Image (cartoon, rainbow, N blue to C red):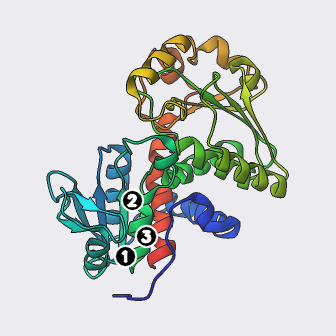
Amino acid sequence: MASAPLPHLIALPDLGRDRLRDVLDLAERVKGRPARGELSGRSVGMLFFRGSLRTRASFEAAVNQLGGQVLNLTAMSDFWDLEEREGTVMDGRAPEHVKDAAKVLSRYVDLLSIRTAPEAAGWEVARQDRVIRAWAKHATVPLINMESAQHHPLQALGDLLTLRQHLGDLSRRRLAVTWVHSPEPASIGVVHSLLHGAALKGMDVRVAHPPGYEIDGEILSQARDFAQSTGGSLETGLALEDAVEGAEVVYARSWQSLEHYGNKTLGASHRARHMAWRIDSKLLGLGRDARLMHAMPIRRNVEVTDEILDGPRSLVYDQAENRLHSQKALLLHLLR
């Protein structure tokens, strides 16, 4: 069992451009061949502090198909509250510190993967991703972020693999990322990681959202820097039709207003003004033979119409499948 600190994947840029390319290349090769036992004798710990369907199923299947073993733990049913703050007097609800849990689990498994719970506080606190970074600080095996407030790198890897398989070389290909209404908005981490990935691949990205749903400023700055270095571009704050016009792929996603983050009542009131923001055939027709992507779960006929989701232009099931292959490639890259 390795004891020295090894690389972690908290945000997609942690891979770097060359390693990102290598992982996607390997994912395409892995997808085209039968499963092998490359991770035989290796174990992976998965800890979920909130619900999951695709991430949990695809990651566990990836480990199993590579011949490894999974230790799968869910908060509230398999373990207790954990404290992440340093130097605190632990006389409250949490009986154990992340420091101790991370160090112990690192002696049981070869890799840790964590999905954190959403922060109840405002965005300035949530954006710090304190919990996942505490785990990364104290783990002595590689750690993968399975979604935090700021990032969802595993979704971005599957998305980039899907984009590559349908568009080929991604340089200067046109991607529209569009906010859509949902009564229960999803994490903005998917959008952040998608912007990182698309910019690292030199895509021309247009982001549409209503006023009050701006992307985190630090993420935008990073994505613009990546785009400048790769020959891509990034425009934000566009109207829905302006972003979709001429796009080759339209990526729909709900996300919370960062201004109202943690305030459900105010957030719901604000979202109610933008119920017309959804994807239908008329809107998708503004693109250039545009395909639809969505990270799922998806509220049918609220975010996207059935006609689009069940039609030939939908890539949502390809996306979901490609989570399996891209995660296999990442596991092989980190553990083989």
Residue at which label 1 appears: 39
Amino acid type shown at disc 2: Val
Note whether residue 22 is visible.
no
Residue 226 picture location, percent across and down: 76, 55
Quadrant for the N terminus, please.
bottom left
Amino acid type shown at disc 1: Leu
Marks 1, 2: nearer the viewer: 2
Q: CA distance from mark 1 to mark 2?
A: 28 Å
Q: Is residue 259 left or right of residue 48?
A: right
Secondary structure state at the residue bearing disc 1: loop
Give the residue displayed 56% in from the left and 50% down from the top: 156
Give the residue displayed 47% in from the left and 49% down from the top: 125
Residue at which label 2 appears: 131
Residue at which label 3 appears: 136
Give the mark nearest the N terminus, 2 or 3: 2
Note whether residue 289 is visible.
yes
Judge the density around disc 1: few (<14), some (14-19), many (≥20) Cα neighbours within 10 Å: some
Judge the density around disc 2: few (<14), some (14-19), many (≥20) Cα neighbours within 10 Å: many
Q: Out of 272 and 51, give the one closest to the viewer.
A: 272
